[in-house]
Each structure stands twice: as structure tokens, then as C-alpha cells.
Amino acid sequence: MNLITRIPDTNGKERVVIIGGGFAGLELAKKIDQKKYQIVLIDKNNYYQFQPLFYQVASSGLEPSSITYPHRKSFQRSKNFHFRMCKAQEVLPKENILRTNIGDIPYDKLIISTGCDTNYFGNDKLREDTFPLKSVSESLLLRNRILLSFEEALSAKNEDELKETLTFVIVGGGATGVELAGALADMRSSILPKDYPEIDFDKMEIHLIDASPRILSSMSEKASTSATNALIKRNIILHQNISVKSYNRPEVELSNEEKIISRNVFWVAGVKPNSLNGLAETAYHSRGRILVNKLNQVNGYNDIFAIGDTAILITEENPKGHPQVAQVAIQMAKNLARNLNNFSDEKEYVPFVYHDRGSLATIGRNAAVADLGRFRFGGRFAWWLWLWVHILSIIGMRNRIAVFIDWVWNYLNYDVSLRLLIKPKANKMYEEQ
């Protein structure tokens, strides 16, 4: 056993180890009573990422620093909180040990909040040739690809090559796909012609492909219809109830045998849970999510819990589990923190019950859709509501102000000067240990 010796002694408190600092993990770490527990948060990054705005970084609407926040800064005043940047490799339930790439961490209670990654549905070729959008680093890579396309268009040798560089294919009709398509359409109409006056942007095509019969399928039909109309108005080409069969660059083959020629294929079509080695097979659902009870205990374990996208709670009311969205993750974290805080007081546990507070999605400037209980609407008011909800959800006052300034400046001037094509230099210091 290779214990991490530099984590301080618990001083008689139970140690709670949290894997993953996303919506669920960070919320849990904030809500746990540190007078009763020592908290150890581990994450492969040393910062929190606000996932709903990845597409804004990718489309040069926001700086990456505006939607990230250092984990250590969030807990500067917390004496019983410790952060380690590492990767969880395996759990040893019998020994109450979590094995990581920097050593082993003993735990009293283990919380798995590892979230999800991009799902390519078994097609490894798509993993190699398309661009996902599940992290800030991937957002920057996608931003580089978008900007590089226009630079390549300026030196295209013929019309076929020009078409390859000016055609953008977005696979996935959920909120991320719709919002990215809308952002690209806004860039095409108001920003790119000023940056690249030599290019005829009437030749730029934006394709949105979705295997579902309607986009934003998790929202109401009214929201879906409104979003569809807004995208069509922005000259986005929709392919609904159609999937991607293969992609052999630059040819995208669809399930209806149609072919699209493009160098720019952005894959936001699905997610798969990030699981953890060491748990019994009975702990997993058929789709890879971790089975939990109403107290978020992993099936078969009393001291291991799972929350957020990687967890699935199956009940009579929700036979397919809850949606993999931020609100579910946050509410699971709050409920689990309440139960953990009550353990030593021997109070009755509170079973998890999800309260749907509605959904919002933006399609572009002055266009969004909202499902808020009985109230379902779209247009300018929904767009302003979307803006304020996201500003208030961002961590850090500096970040909120930065996002607000960028959005106001963009709204007034139809431009934000963040279109920087910055290529990282390869260096051995970033290699895995």
C-alpha cells in the first residue's frame, strides 16, 4: 500500500473522500459540516468548470478563465478541507482505500461524482476525427478549429476545398448542439464578415444532425418547435431523426445515405458515465451508470455513495432514472450533505426527491426557449432570463462581472475580441506521471 502521507490526520473525524469537483462534488464539499468531517476532494483538474458555457468559449464569446474557478480558492478558509489533483484509478472497498495515480487515500466515506464523458457509441474512428465539447481544454481546441477553418478558407485552392473549410457539422440536437449552432450562425451574420472580408459567408453552411425526431427532445414540444423555427430562421440546416453512419474525413455519411463534405465535425451527441474500477458488477446499471438507493448509497455498499451524472436512482416514479443535468446533481449533493451531517446526530435520513425547476436553452441573440413548470415561452424575454440565470450560477464575483461585461459589450457592438488562435506548445512536463 502506497499511502499519501501528506494529507493531515483527521483528528478523530471521519474522512469523506469526494471524487470529482463538478456540479455535484463541489456542492457536496461546500455543504458538508467540517466540524464533523475531514473532506478530501480529488480531481484531475485543479479548477471547477461551468459546463453550460463551454460552447461560448468555443465560439469566442467568453474567455476560458471566466467560466473556471480554482478549487483551492473556493476553500481557502476551510481548515478541514484538502484538495489533491490526481486521477482515481480503483477503489478497494474491503480496505476502505481509494487508489490514485499519486498514491492511496484511506476513507471512511467515499463519494463518486465523476460525471460523464463523450459517448461515441462504440465508434472509435469518430473519437479520433471529431471534436468533442466536454471540458475547457476541448472548448479551446474547438475554438482553434473554428478559427483555423477561416484561415484555411483564405488559401483554398478550389471551390471544393473552400466548401470543406466553410461547412460545419454539429452532431447532437440537445442544448449544447443547439446553442453551438446558434452561436456559429450569429458569428456568420455579424462578426466573421468584418474579420474576413475576402470570404463570401453565404457559402458557409451549418448542419445540425440529431438522431431524435425533434431537437431539444428533453424539453417540451413547444420549446422544440420554437427552437427549430429560430434555427431555420438563422439558415441552419437541420437533419432530424437521422444519425451519423461514419466519418471518413472530409466525408460525413448519414443514416439516410446523404453525404456532407466537411473538415469540421463537432460531436455533442451523447454522454457516458465515468465509472470507477473495484466495484462489484451489481453496482452498475446496464448503461454503465452506478445504481444508488434513495440515500445515494451505491448498491451493495454502506459507505460508498454516488451522485450526479454517474449515478442512477430507479424508482416507480422514475423507472429510467433522472435526467443527467446540473440541477439533479446539485440537489443530490445537497440531500446527501444533509444526511451526512445528520449521521452523528442519529436523525432520520431524508430520501432524495428531485424537484424539476425547469429548463432553458438559447438559440442565439435575442432567442431562447424556457420550460418553467406550466410556463413555456421563448423569444427575447427567455433569452434575457437565460443570461441572468447563467451569470448568477457562475462561481466567483470576478467571473460574473467578466461574463456580464463581455455579453453587454457583444450585445452593443456585435463583437468581442476573443478570437485568438493559440496553439499549445508540446512539453514533457505535461506528460502523465
Image (cartoon, rainbow, N blue to C red):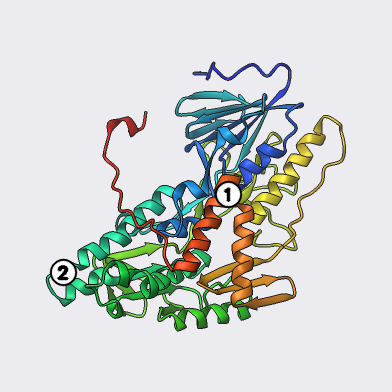
In this rendered view, identify the residue nearer to me: 97 or 190.
Answer: 190
Taking 310 as reference, is 385 above or below it? Answer: below
Give the residue type at disc 1.
Answer: Thr
> Which residue is at 53% across, 40% downward?
276
- Compared with residue 81, is residue 400 higher up or lower down, i.e. above or below? below
Q: Is residue 190 left or right of residue 86?
A: left
Per the image, label 1 sits on a secondary structure element best described as helix
Q: Look at the numbered disc 2 and give the secondary structure of its residue.
A: loop
From the viewer's perspective, is 198 left or right of 334? Answer: left
The 10 Å Cα crowd at callout 1, few under 14, some 14 to 19, many 20 or more, is: many
Left or right relative to 341: residue 299: left
Residue that badge 2 annotates:
156
- Residue 199 location, x and y as percent? 24, 73
Residue 406, x across and y down, in percent: 49, 57
102 above or below 208?
above
Per the image, the residue denoted by label 1 is 310
Q: Is residue 275 visible?
A: no
Gap in angstroms between the C-alphas marked 2 and 1: 44 Å
Evaluate whether residue 353 shows in this view: yes
Say which residue appears at 27% left-offset and 71% top-offset.
Answer: 166
Position in image of residue 279 (x %, y %): 57, 38
Q: Amino acid at mark 2?
A: Ala
Asked if labels 1 and 2 touch by Cβ distance under 8 angstroms, the answer is: no
Query: Residue at the spot x=42%, y=72% of the render?
Result: 186
Q: Residue 304, how many percent across, how many down?
A: 66, 36
Which quadrant would the C terminus be assigned to in this image?
A: top left
Residue 243's tag is none
User: 238 or 53, which is in the foreground?
Assistant: 53
Q: Residue furthest left?
A: 157
